[in-house]
Image: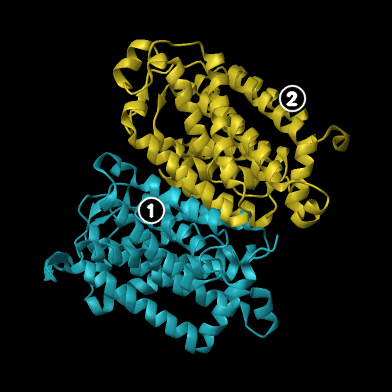
Amino acid sequence: MQYLVDALSLGSLYALGALGIALIFGVMRLVNFAHGSIIACCVFSLIVPSVEAQAQLLAGRLPDWVLVPAVLAVGAGLSVVSEFVVFRRLRQANPATMMIASFALGFTIQNVLLLLYSSRPKSLDLWSQLGQSVELWGARIPFLQLITIGVGLLTLSALSFLLKHTRVGIEMRAAAEDFTMARMLGVRANAVITLTFAISGALAAAIALLLVSQTGVADIRMGLPIMLVAFIATVIGGLGSLAGSVAAGFLLGAVTVLLQVVLPLDARTFRDAFLYLGVIAVLVWRPQGLLASPTTVSRI
Amino acid sequence: MLLSLLLLAVAVAAALTGSEAVERTASEMFIRMVLVIGLYIFVGNSGVMSFGHVGFMCIGAYASAWQTLPVAMKQLVLPGLPQWLLDSSISPLPAAIFSALLVAVVALISGLVLMRLSGIAASIATFAFLAVVNVVYSNWDSVSAGTSSVVGIPVYANLWVTIAWAIVAIAIAFFYSVSRYGLALRAVREDPVAAQACGVWVYRERLVAYVLSAFVVGLAGVLYAHFLGVLNPDAFYLDNTFLALAMLVVGGVSSLSGAVVGVLSLSLLIELLVRMEDGVRFGETMLSLPGGAQEVLLGVAMILMLIFRPGGLMAGREIVWRKLF
């Protein structure tokens, strides 16, 4: 039971990350390496720029119901600004260039944070009262994990409602599946892309909040591990398939926890190696991903 | 071959300044050049972005360390090595060749699996490969001393050694790219369907490029180990991966000159920014950047370079004698 909740909570986190990456990747074929830095930026917007080990709250002082939208707005805003400044001019460039540009952007943001905050991980107390355990079906589960699962499911259902039943959502899905065709059918490219970046940024902010509550530490590199798993989940899930990336996020979370449980003690430090070998195996078996849309299956 | 002359000129210039720091920086630049040239052999010719090559660098570096560390230290720090490695310690040049060959073998095995993939799937698979290598080397303590570094590696990679290997790497890359295999792979890059229709076996061509590039990158790893004298798996993970890819893309992914120019320009830029952080005298005043701004400016410079020349600095062309005069 404990493991199930662990798997679901880790999977939710990965799924949120995967969705953030998959949205931008689907619409622009851009692997957004800046995503991890946006996560870090959202975390650091909560505290005052300083080099001390104990963080003082800046935005973190606001009452909760203002704090959450504020951080989401920071994430979305930063994402939209990055789109406007960097990616808009590179839309016609080849994917390698866009990818390196996004990496350079992430590198720049990370080093700006380094300038302002120093590389020392700071302790940050955000909603730590949620760390208490709750007795549920015979297992002691930290309340925060339930919150993570709850937030994950809520966000995913809200987004899926947006994507399936509203006009903008349908436009975004169409753009993710086949951008050129969507433009020909009247979807306004700039609007869709900007909105995609905004939602992706907001998702990054959500991940940031959850991560900070979970670990209580603010570190400039904290977005990187999640971002990397999110890329892998996006590709495994299927290019252009948003549902696929979410499913793959949950799958990776479940497999990670499963490996943690099943592997003998000696091999446990190599858990990640087995996970990535599994990723390679999945890719060799189905290179287009698990839930790929028919337009992306390569025909040769 | 003009490139080799260019590099020799840079090396001589560096040697002439007489300062050890400049020589070390130049050596490091040449090591990076070997890495990026190796990367170009695969990425530039096949069009498949590979994140995993720094993993080959890691394997090569550790392999050379295993062979050349003094015996007493080996037995102390790395007890898990097989006995025949623990008992002997060989001289650097054969060690380098053996290490690069080991890397090539690993590349052959992994390439047999990975080259069946195309496009983004291949890229993510290479990234998974890098992660596997990193996890294995970080945790297999008895063989690689884990995250505490391996120290005491003989340091012989000075300016002349590194430039010699850089020229060797350029030669390998050049002869590959004008060979039948290189041309076939470039055909696949441009239009896979047409290339297959002409009888090109995509899988084999990619495998050849992959193994060759791994060989060169393994050499870069060997040089890196003998340049620093200290090895740590963290050096072979994301930071170096992205720096190498950035140098390749900024220079121009599809040409050898692009690889070289990319490394040269970014290395110069980094050096310049580091110097500016220390302070530059303009007559009476001392202009200096705040500490830490160097990386920010580097990132901004890379973004600007890519915005204004999306194909990279060389945009796929080579530096050739005829076109200069």
The colour one sees for chain B in the rendered image is yellow
Say yes or no: labels 1 and 2 on the same chain: no
| In this picture, residue B76 sits left or right of residue A136 | right
The residue that label 2 is drawn on is: B5
Please tell me how crowded label 1 is: few (under 14), some (14-19), or many (20+) other residues with Cα within 10 Å: few
> In this rendering, which labeled residue sits more in front, label 1 or label 2?
1
Give the CA separation, mark 1 to mark 2.
43 Å
- Point 56% across, 14% down: residue: B94
Relative horizontal placement of residue A117, taking residue B290 as reference (left or right) = left
Colour in which the image shows chain A: cyan
- Taking the image as shown, residue B50 lies to the left or right of residue A281, namely right
Instruction: Give the amino acid type for the residue marked by disc 1 in the picture.
Output: Pro
User: From the image, which quarter does the C terminus of chain A lie in?
Assistant: bottom right
- Where A108 falls versus B256 (above or below)? below
Disc number placed over residue A225 in the picture, else none? 1
* Residue drawn at (33%, 28%) of the image: B145
